[in-house]
Image: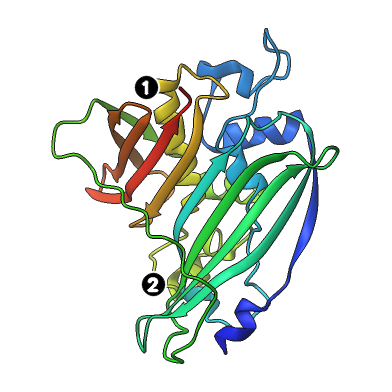
Amino acid sequence: MALRAVFDHPIPDAVLDYGPRDTTFYALSLGLGDEALPFVYEGAPGGMRALPGMGLVLADPGFWMRDMALDLPRLVHLAERLELERPIPPRGRLHRQTRVTHVADRGAGRGALLVADSVLSDAADGGMIARLRQTVLARGDGGSGESHGPAPERSAIAIPERAPDAVIDRPTLRQQALLYRWNGDLNPLHADPAVARAAGFERPILHGLCTMGIASLAVMEAFGDWRADAITMMEARFSAPVFPGETLRCAMWREGARVLLRASVCERGVAALDPALFILKT
């Protein structure tokens, strides 16, 4: 497929109405329980709150490539960046605008990069809530030599060469991908064994954004005191898939407001997020 068609592909704006059920479901789909009750119970003292990572769901355009002539089973979610201007409300009506901002052929056999940027705002007053950048590698679609749109700045994140300041293990559920997909990303790669095998995986894999959300829970537990406004930015590179049922070991290094993180799969000893960066509210 010509990458120009991908670059010009219109992604419809969306109006998002959501409430306590959606906010609770997101937290539960990450494996959060009663250790942080305001995120999973609308009657919690002091009121309900939304996890910062819920911006990954609300601002994400979902599987927007599904109707394009790309090699869909070989698409890989490469990286994600979320910037929060203010905490995500636990209920409300939001407006999402998304456009493809950069496509670049990496050469024959190396695939093509697809970058989409989203803006999430309050539907009532237009106030900015969050910005999201999604980077996808189309492994089966390189070789045309095309490039369209300005290349985003490369993020310079380096894990310190010292012992981590905190390490937290968070287990995942065997059914976690089947739960998480109902946040909006219905890519069959996360549910259908045949699709997963066609993409080169032994079974369906966990969503990268689910892995990132789980890592954000570790940051909030270790350094954020479970505050809804604890994290103002999160960014991660997805370096290996996680299979539902595996345990994520989140090693964290704090440098002022910055938390560098590497999330590894305990059972296989591979890094799933490497590197990741979280910015804490100061």
Q: Residues within 10 Å of mark 2 (few under 14, many from 20)?
A: few
Identity of the residue furthest to the left in this view:
162
In this image, 157 relative to 57: left or right?
A: left
Q: Which residue is mark 2?
A: 200
x then y, percent, for residue 149:
55, 74
Query: What amino acid is found at the position of numbered circle 1 in the picture?
Result: Ala
Residue in the foreground of this view, choosing between 45 and 163? 163
Residue wearing tag 1 = 222
Q: Position of residue 150 (x, y in %)?
A: 51, 71
The residue at the point 50 percent across, 53 percent down is 207
Which amino acid lies under the numbered mark 2 shown in the image of this protein?
Answer: Gly
Count neighbours of disc 1 (C-alpha within 10 A) and say few if under 14, some if 14 to 19, many if 20 or more.
Answer: some
Residue 230 to residue 275: above or below: above
* Location of residue 134 in the rendering, given as x and y in whole percent from the top left corner: 53, 59
Q: Which residue reaches farthest top?
A: 45
Please report the residue visible at 36 percent of the width from the left and 45 percent of the height from the top.
Answer: 276
* Quadrant in which the C terminus appears: top left
Disc nearer the start of the sequence (2/1) = 2
In which image quadrant can residue 116 be found? bottom right
Task: State the CA–CA distance, disc 2 to disc 1.
Answer: 35 Å
Q: Residue furthest right?
A: 124
Would residue 69 be visible to someone looking at this image?
no
